[in-house]
Image (cartoon, grey):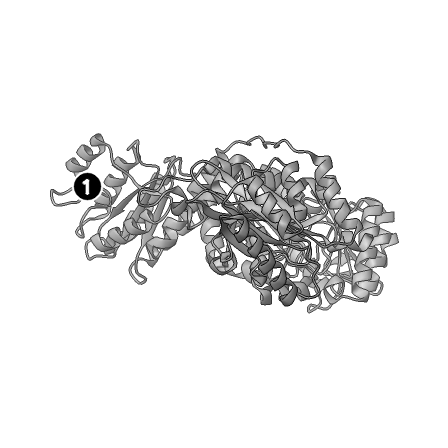
Amino acid sequence: MKQNLEYLFSPKSIAIIGASSHPEKIGHIVLQNLQEMNFKGEIYPVNPKAKTILGLPVFSDIKSLPKKIDLAVITVPRGLAVKSVEELGEKGVKAVIVISAGFKEIGGKGYHQEQKLIEIAKKYNIALLGPNCLGLINTHANLNTTFATGIPNKGNISFFSQSGALCVAILDWALGENIGFSKFISLGNKAILDETDMIEYLGKDPKTKVILGYIENVCSGEKFIQTAKKVTRNKPILLIKSGRTAAGARAASSHTGAIAGSDKAYSTAFSKAGIIRVFDVETLFNLALAFSTQPLPQGPNLTIITNSGGPGIMAADICENSKLQMTRLSAETIQKLKQILPGYAALYNPIDIIGDADAKRYLDTIDVIVDDPNTHAILVLLSPTSAIAPQITELAKGIVKKCKNIPKPIFCVFMGKHHVKKGQKILLDNNIPCYLFPEPAIRSLETMYKHWEWTKKGEIKIEIPKRNLELAKKVINEAIVTKQREIVEFQALKILQAYNLPHPKTKLARSSDEAMHIAEEIGFPVVLKIASPSISHKTDVKGVIINLNSPKEVKNAFLEITSRAQRLRPEAHITGCLVQKMAPKGCKEVIVGFKRDDQFGPLIMFGLGGIYVEVLKDISFGLAPLTRDDAQNMIRQIKSYLLLKGFRGEPPVNFKAIEDIILIMSQLSLDLPEVFEAEFNPVLVNDKEALVADVRLIISANNNKKN
């Protein structure tokens, strides 16, 4: 099917199944759009009643078409659409666009009809786009198979969308903004071709520099990540993912039959693949314009040229709150600026060339800054003073001329409306980003810099920790056989042992006398914890007593814990108590866990631990498999990182020990697919070690059903 994508995007012959003489019908509009786009290949309208449509001879059915057809566009109702794809397959057609609706998105019979469509496409190896889609546009092949109005200009931006209506709106908006496209693709229900196929194709397309997309779900998470990761090394991918909230997820499901996954998993997957996630259409096209027209900054240093102190300071503040930095200009650059600027100008970035600056002063300053070795990007900031207002078009033309030979990105901010609009238009018409305010300009530059960092980042080898996989699987299989959904701490100790996870000395006591004996063996002080396969959250039954320093205290604690648990949870089987060595003083609590996401697999979690994790939600995420860099980044991302690093004279915790536990959790999630969820909470960490003090694992419900 992938080999046939070229027939989808650059066909030499097209059949329109359901071509119509009625101007309002989709079959007529598609045919008209092809002609208006000046498509160079053969067009074959198919309609059982008409003789000619828009000056073209009409074929009565698919069987009467010429033998070699590259692409067919289907606009007939659902039932006929399925039959048409079968006939086209028999005829050897390589690619098909099914615009027809009424399939998976409406459920019931529509879902089953789409399954038939999939079977037929696979049977004949057809590259099928849709159903329930708008079609596609390839400006460089003069191809427009959509029923949208308007033809976009040629460009180097490609856009795909799961929503046809959004395609129409964005196409119309882009026409108004004079933004050009290379490819414009409506995915529809993604019966065969999906976002991953588009990313792979567009990644190799020489006419595409930037890839944009709107998605509601991802069909194959691992394939999506691996494909996107390869593409983003060379081209930026910017995606809007909807269904972020519960209401949005429900809407996504009813809209195209998509099952929305965890939003955190999507953000983490995008980050792992180098995809830039965008949350609104305006930002999407701000970034698209920036990436498609300007070189990437080769570092974080931004130099600001302004004719007004206030906006310059605002821009500097925004810069300081980003990953960018204000450039420290070289001594040579400062000397050159002194020669061309008034003595009262500010030379040390932001470079304030003063409110009486004219176009020449701006352009001369740009010439100096371009040669500054410390500058990676330039922001030209303008307020329409009486001195510059009459020369704004002259300045804009001068910047356009300079940009043709400058290897560094230049962004403009022309603040205002009335006096600057002609200059803004000149810049935008010549593919130079121009903004009304500093913030979107600097955020766009920051995103470009982050992407440049990503392109320089090489693949890092995954560390495989030593483990006894046979022992771990034995514990899991025993739980599945006994239809146990949850493996709690006293049962999961063997899992800790299997993965060589450091944990306090722990033993199960089934009686108070046994608890006293174990405590003396382990050494005081100790902790007692309720041991029951039915009680996972021990604090709910006050099932933990700490800092026990004598046999008598241990005995009393055992009786207190077990009797209280029996009273509060009479249905629960109480096995006894775990006796555990108290952790060293000064330990901090963190949590390491994972949850298996439907689309992307194990989503690893790290954060501040203990009982307040659900309240504070100071957590970070990563997708397995994790590298040590990934683990380090997860630790640094939480707000509590500074507490772990050491506060008011405290020593920093042993970060490598935490990293090791995160990497083991990542490996465990891959080794044990039957486990749906797992948690080490708390992990007690100080400057010397990290100890897993409690553990629980949840078996997937599907595994229990099988047994």
Q: Quadrant of the N terminus?
A: top right
Instruction: Determine whether 651 is above or below 531 in the image.
Output: above
Residue 690 at x, y percent in the picture: 50, 40
**How many numbered discs, if any?**
1
Front one among 116 and 525: 525
Residue 28, by quadrant, is bottom right
Front one among 514 and 178: 514
Front one among 287 and 637: 637
Q: Residues within 10 Å of mark 1 (few under 14, many from 20)?
A: some
Residue found at x 66% / y 53%: 576
Residue 109 at x, y percent in the picture: 82, 66
Front one among 604 and 16: 604
Residue found at x 11% / y 42%: 343
The residue where tag 1 is placed is 347
Tell me: 86 left or right of 589: right
Residue found at x 57% / y 62%: 540
Residue type beneath disc 1: Leu
